Each structure stands twice: as structure tokens, then as C-alpha cells.
Image (cartoon, grey):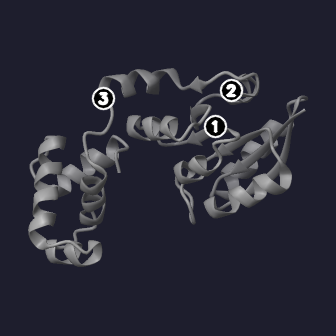
Amino acid sequence: MIRVLIADDQDLVRGGLAALLALEPDIEVVAEVGRGDQVVAAAAEHDPDVVLLDIEMPGLSGLEVAERLRDRRVIIVTTFGRPGYLNRALDAGVAGYVVKDAPVTELTAAVRRVMAGERVIDPKLAVTALTVGPSPLTQREAEVLRVASDGSTVADIARRLFLTEGTVRNYLSSAIGKTGARNRAEAARVAESRGWL
């Protein structure tokens, strides 16, 4: 039996995945959690063979959790088919990346293949990731752009990140240039759509 832990903040999705996987004769769902900050403890308690993680969850993101579970087989199962997320997931050591609109047979096959030691990546997303490439933003540029995305002023961003206003302007200008955007709002949209934030 392949023991699986499911982490997804949407009850319906989590329950649906658990019900579908329970129909498989060789897969057993041993735990379900709805928050990212519950996953590590649940993995320690239930010792799953494979952990299925959503990306956006309260507490910790699936990418942050994957970093902490490098010693386990992790598959990201998400609606976010963004190349930047895929690259970050691979950097975190995940064994698989499946988008939620894939057929159930693909997910069950991914669980079995990951258990067999393979790496499983959604093929369309892999091609897109190769085309788009890794994020050109530095960690600090991404951080400033993330804070700017809510419409904060330069002064607000500077206060929140303990930077000078001139430094914030420099980071924003650099991020705008690297994303090919006309302004910081557009730069944030571009970066978010590519999974760079």
C-alpha cells in the first residue's frame, strides 16, 4: 500500500482527492490537513510514503512546506500551472508537479511513479517553463514587487521592508525593466502570472 497525506486548504478539493484515491486498491490516504503549517507534524505522525501539497495554503505555502520535507516524496497538486512555481518547486526538491485539471488517472499514475523513484512533471507546464525560463528578479526585487502589488506607496514599502525610499525606487525600476512592464502594477501582474512572486 502507498500511504498518502493530502494537504489542501479547500475542504471539497481535499475530500474529493481523498475519496478518489481511496478507490485505488494500492493507495491509502492516511491523513488530510487544511493548513500548510500542519503538514510537517502530520507527516511525522502518519509517516506517509507520498505527500500531496497544494501551493497556496494558510500558515505556510506548499513550496515552503516542500522545502521542509526534502526527505519525503512530495507532489505539488495545484491549480497554478505557472512556470515560476514549477521552477521553485523543483528547487525545493519535489518529486512531482500535477495541475488540478489533469485527469484522476494522471494523479494516481503520478503517485505510483513517484513511489517508484521517478520524477513526474506536467508536460505542458514543463515546456512552458523551458520557454519562459527562471525568474530574472532578485529575491529583494521580488519582495519589493510583492509588497507593491497591493498599491502601497513607495514610503509605505520602505517602512515595511526597512529600506530607504530611494532603494525601493531602484528595486521597482529594476523589476519593471526585467518584466518588460510599463509600471509597477503591470510588473507585479506579469511576475505573478509567471509564478515569480
Q: Alpha-carbon distance for marks 3 and 1? A: 22 Å
Q: Which mark is residue 75?
A: 1
Name the kind of residue labelled 1 in the image.
Ile
- The residue identified by callout 2 is 110
Name the kind of residue labelled 2 in the image.
Ala
Tell me, yes or no, whether the two marked residues, 3 and 1, touch with CB atoms within 8 Å: no
Q: What residue lies at 62% left-to-right and 31% top-to-bottom?
A: 95
> Image check: 194 left or right of 118?
left
Tell me residue 31's x, y (percent). 81, 52
SS at badge 3: helix
- The residue identified by callout 3 is 132
Q: Which mark is residue 171?
A: none
Q: Alpha-carbon distance for marks 2 and 1? A: 8 Å
If you read the primary sequence from the N terminus, does the residue marked by circle 2 or circle 1 appear first? 1
Tell me residue 115's x, y (percent). 76, 27
Tell me, yes or no, whether the two marked residues, 2 and 1, touch with CB atoms within 8 Å: yes
Q: Which image quadrant for residue 125?
A: top left
From this view, report whether residue 87 is shown above or below residue 119.
below
